[in-house]
Image: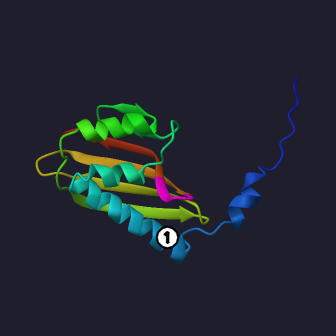
């Protein structure tokens, strides 16, 4: 019989030490999130490109595409028709420590299904950048 000795998860000690939604850090990320939203609705491709982390490890899963790497995301943006305005139904932005955060959005464009968007943000030497994003549409009724 194999015996396993369980040890306390060491990361939990670290998690207890980080600040969640530090007002200064949260404000910084909210400004970047708002900047992203304005760029998305106005189809400012250059601005959107600048908000994604330039790395082959950056990922964006969309409603019809799976994009791996900054260059694939950049090409998608340049080839895409403008998505247009949308109504934000719910949004939340949460920061963890000084350098990491997530954003979650429920949205709807006129006459379409409800969509969901999540982003993982990381502070870099060049500012806050999206390192992972996911967009999906809820099943129609």
Q: Nearer the viewer, residue 117 or 37?
A: 37
Q: Is residue 62 visible?
A: no
* Category of crowding for the residue at label 1, using alpha-carbon neighbours closer than 10 angstroms: few (below 14), some (14–19), many (at least 20): many
- Residue displayed at 39% across by 69% down: 31
Image quarter (top left, top right, bottom left or bottom right) of the C terminus: top left
Q: Residue furthest left?
A: 111
Q: Position of residue 88 (x, y in %)?
A: 26, 60
Question: Where is residue 5, by image quadrant?
Answer: top right
Q: Is residue 126 magenta?
A: yes
Mark 1: which secondary structure?
helix
Q: Which residue bears the numbered disc 1?
A: 26
Question: Where is residue 47, by image quadrant?
Answer: bottom left
Q: Position of residue 132 (x, y in %)?
A: 47, 45
> In the image, which residues are magenta?
124-129
- Residue displayed at 43% across by 49% down: 52
Lateral position of residue 110 relative to residue 24, left or right:
left
- Residue displayed at 49% across by 55% down: 121
Q: Is residue 35 visible?
A: yes
- Residue displayed at 48% across by 48% down: 53
Q: Position of residue 41 (x, y in %)?
A: 22, 55
* Predominant SS along the magenta part: strand
Q: Is residue 7 magenta?
A: no
Q: Nearer the viewer, residue 64 or 9?
A: 64
Lateral position of residue 113 relative to residue 50, left or right:
left
Tell me: residue 82, above or below residue 13.
above
Q: Position of residue 48 (x, y in %)?
A: 34, 51
Image quarter (top left, top right, bottom left or bottom right) of the N terminus: top right
């Amino acid at each position: 019989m194999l015996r396993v000795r369980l040890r306390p998860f060491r990361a939990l000690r670290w998690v207890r030490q980080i600040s969640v939604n530090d007002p200064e850090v949260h404000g910084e990320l909210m400004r970047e999130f708002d900047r992203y939203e304005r760029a998305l609705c106005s189809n400012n491709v250059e601005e959107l490109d600048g908000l994604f982390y330039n790395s082959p490890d950056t990922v964006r899963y969309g409603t019809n595409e799976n994009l791996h790497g900054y260059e694939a995301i950049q090409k998608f943006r340049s080839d895409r028709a403008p998505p247009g305005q949308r109504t934000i139904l719910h949004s939340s932005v949460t920061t963890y420590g000084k350098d990491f955060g997530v954003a979650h959005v429920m949205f709807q464009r006129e006459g379409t299904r409800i969509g969901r968007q999540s982003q993982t943000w990381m502070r870099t030497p060049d500012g806050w950048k999206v390192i992972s994003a996911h967009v999906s549409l809820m099943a129609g009724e």
